[in-house]
Image (tube, rainbow, N blue to C red):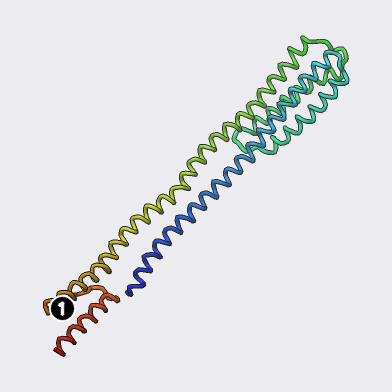
Amino acid sequence: MKLRFKILSGFLILALMLSIAGIWSIYELKSMSTSVQSLLKENYRSINAAKIMTESLEREDSAILLLLLGNWNEGRKILLAADSLFKEGFSIAENNVTIPGEETLVRAIETKYNAYKSIWERPLADPYQRHDMAWYLENAHNAFLDLKSSVSDLMTMNDKFMFETASGLKEEANRAIMPGVVAMVSALIFTLLFNYFVNFYFVNPIIRINRSIKETMANKAKFDVEIDTKDEIAELAESVRTLFNSIKTQA
């Protein structure tokens, strides 16, 4: 094997190791980036939907009080607007079910809201229901608190899932780093091995040839260096041997 090819092979192996590690790291980082984007997109959408529903419920609760206090026009206006807002938030949550158990919670919110709406529709249809604070506290307000608690559970569920997923992403980040670490360690080991082989097959033979040349010239001894490899260094040793033999013959 030629000397040039031996050296080139060593560098090609090192480059291949680093390339594989680089591609692996890029793949892991890209996968982690996709997971982060999906996490933020899906869970934030559900959290935002829960905030919209919570805001609309609080408006509806205030509007019911306005109705009971006789402020018919303002209360009715706020109540109907809040109802539309709640439906908007619920639609987002309903179409963004991504967590185990989330579907059940969304259906529970839907059922509770329909029941709550049937309660607050009474003062809209029945003027005699106005000023009945006992009815509000026993019926409307309790239903409001129960529904709001379920919406809060939806938000908490998504918050918790985001935290758990973030912990998983930390492990993915460690996996993305590992190829680089492995590559550096492998490259270091390979460099040490490559240095050993360079010394063993290239540097040491040249030192032996140089030493033998000096001894031959100083003591007129026989040039006697055996190179086991079949490369340019072996050819060099043979050429030096031939040269000394030629000089000795001419002398």
Q: Check disc 1 and report the residue beneath it.
A: 217
Instruction: Identify the residue shown where x is 41% and y is 54%.
Output: 183
Residue 14: x and y, percent?
39, 61
The residue lying furthest to the bottom in this view is: 250
The front one of 136 and 47 is 47
19 sits left or right of 120 in the view: left
Instruction: Identify the residue shown where x is 73% and y is 12%.
Output: 138
- In this picture, is 191 found above or below 144? below
Residue 221: x and y, percent?
12, 78
Residue 55 occupies which quadrant of the picture? top right
Residue 120: x and y, percent?
80, 20
Residue 101 occupies which quadrant of the picture? top right
37 sits left or right of 190 in the view: right
Name the quarter where the N terminus is drawn.
bottom left
- In this picture, is 23 found above or below 122? below
Residue 251: x and y, percent?
13, 89
- The total number of labels drawn is 1
The front one of 118 and 64 is 64
How crowded pointer 1 is (Cα within 10 Å; few <14, some 14-19, many 20+) is rated as few
The front one of 217 and 56 is 217
Instruction: Identify the residue shown where x is 82% and y is 14%.
Output: 68
Instruction: Identify the residue shown where x is 83% and y is 13%.
Output: 69
Q: Secondary structure at mark 1?
A: helix
Kind of residue sitting beneath label 1: Met
183 sits left or right of 122 in the view: left
